[in-house]
Amino acid sequence: MFGNNLERIKAEAMQELGGNDDAALGQLWNRVYAAFDQWKQEHGNRKPKAYRGMLSDLVGAKSIPFKKAAPWQCADFQVPAGPIALAIKLWFEHYAPFEAITAEAGIRKVLALLIVGFGEDASEDELNDAMRILHDHKTAEAMGKLVLNEHRDAIIAQQTRSPGGKISGERQTKEKDDRKQLIKDTEAKLPEGTKPHHVNKEISKAVGVSPDTVGRLRREIRKEADSS
């Protein structure tokens, strides 16, 4: 059953990549992996563990050397996961080096590339999450609702990073304020009658921010409004 679903997903990903030659896709993968590796060096678990596809995995993942671990093996996923899961994680967390790539190439192309290259080894949950993002963005673009300011800000943030990897406080404040304004504008455009527990999810789809981040920023927005 999953095999048929995998073939359908990979075929759709191949359509997404149509018109891109192998050399261009190879360059894109090199950039994506470089961002993965940079994240590993900056934030990866120094004592990673990996699932080896053996019966011994039933008692837990096995420790592996940090130097030999792939970036996604340093992400502390609770289940076996690969490049697709790490891409989604970095995109939701707005990791600037990765988001700069998606700003240029598009998250749809990046995920499609990873699905084609690593779909055989991905879990069904990974593939479904990737396809959900791909479909949401395709629908949003078709409806003219996809806002690209988030991606633009990610590039600016990457360009203004200091050697130590921190963005200036002024830049961080501006980015946060811009994101809050984007959320407020998007919420104002939601259809009347949208159920409260669906609001964060709907805003998340439109602006490319995780529902948890949307919820946290909406709470801050309400506190600021109450204190003004």
Image: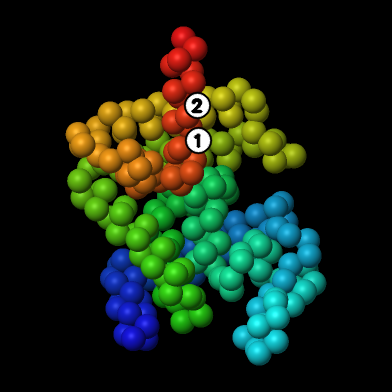
In the picture provided, is 136 more to the left or to the right than 227? Answer: left
For label 1, the SS is: helix
Q: Residue at x 19, y 34 (%)?
A: 192
Q: Residue at x 61, y 60 (%)?
A: 36
How far from the left and from the top, in percent, is residue 196? 32, 38
Amino acid at pointer 2: Glu
Question: Picture quarter containing residue 57?
Answer: bottom right
Amino acid at pointer 1: Arg
Q: What colour scheme has been applied to the protein in the rendered image? A: rainbow
Q: Residue at x 74, y 39 (%)?
A: 164
What mark, if any, has residue 220 been given in the picture? Answer: 2
Crowding near the residue tagged with mark 2, few <14, some 14–19, many ≥20 C-alpha atoms within 10 Å: few
How far from the left and from the top, in percent, is residue 148? 37, 40
Query: Given the current orientation, which residue lies at the most extreme bottom position?
Result: 55
For label 2, the SS is: helix
Question: Picture quarter containing residue 20?
Answer: bottom left
Q: Quadrant of the N terminus?
A: bottom left
Q: CA distance from mark 2 to mark 1?
A: 6 Å
| CB atoms of marks 2 and 1 within 8 Å | yes
How far from the left and from the top, in percent, is residue 204? 38, 44
Across the whole image, how many numbered discs are drawn on residues?
Answer: 2
Give the residue at mark 1: 216
